[in-house]
Amino acid sequence: MKNLFLIANWKANKTEEEAIVWLEEFDKNKTIADGEWEAKEVIICPSYPVLTRVYDFIQKNKLPLRAGSQDVSKFGRGAYTGEVPPALLEKFVRFSIIGHSERRKYFNEDDDVLRDKVNGALSGYSLPVFCVQNENTFIPQGVKIIAYEPVEAIGTGNPDTPENAEKVASFIKEKNKDVTNVLYGGSVTSENVNSFTKMPNIDGALVGGASLNPLEFLRIIKNA
Ligand code: PGA
């Protein structure tokens, strides 16, 4: 059986209180996904103000989860007001989403910026989960984990077809020998997750909206 990555991208949602409620609910109901934890790496990517609380809760309660970040600065430590560099994240995260289409669209992140972010993450603590919008999106050297997320599928309730996602995933692996895992993202739910993860070249899912509900996310883990 292949190992799967299931990543919750909370985006700009959840106050500290809401994050704790989510984690408590998840903890109380985690038997929903019993038997699934060994083959599944489950990562929660909250917003920065909540990241350390999520990390602490996971540690204290020994939850089968890891914390991740939704982004990382392309700069190192220093005079970069408002930025969060790899050195300040390394205690808490092992994975960072980089190049999400919302970062590209609203924050003008281009290939050069994203290459720097990938290099920063790799030189420090974490594995980039690098988002691509299609099979032709530039992938910086050293990236091993890709999330294929077609823009028209994000937050719309209209996922790509598993067959097309599989075609894109296998093309990406074929073209980029460093890439070991390709996840699918875009309107993933507990109902459709398995149609993607059962494909031979799809190694997990990046989940936005559906990850905001702990019970739905547990069902995604179970069904994947
Ligand atoms: P969605 O978002 O699951 O809400 O479509 C996915 C993502 O943007 O990572």
Image (cartoon, rainbow, N blue to C red):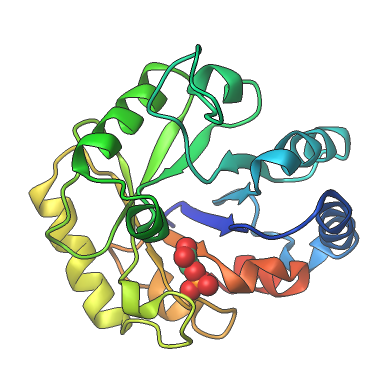
Q: Is residue 49 above or below residue 132?
A: above
Residue 49 location (% of width, % of height): 72, 40
62 to the left or right of 141: right
Question: Residue at point 27% right, 36% down?
Answer: 113
- Give the quarter of the image for residue 28: bottom right
Task: Point out the residue furthest to the top here.
Answer: 78
Q: How many marks?
A: 0
Q: Residue at x 73, y 71 (%)?
A: 213
Residue 125 sits above or below residue 11 on the image: above
Q: Residue furthest left?
A: 175
Q: Is residue 87 left or right of residue 20?
A: left
| Vertical comparison of 90 with 189: above or below | above
- Residue at position x 58%, y 58% in the image: 11
Q: Where residue 65 appears, x then y in whole percent? A: 69, 45
Along the viewing direction, whichever of 200 and 143 lies nearer the viewer: 143
Q: Residue at x 52, y 29 (%)?
A: 83
Q: Position of residue 108 (x, y in %)?
A: 31, 50
- Where on the picture, by quarter, is residue 62? top right
Q: Quadrant of the N terminus?
A: bottom left
x and y percent of residue 10 in the render? Answer: 62, 58
Position of 60 compared to 170: left or right?
right
Along the line of sight, which residue is nearer the eye, 224 or 138?
A: 138
On the picture, is 56 further left or further right than 171? right
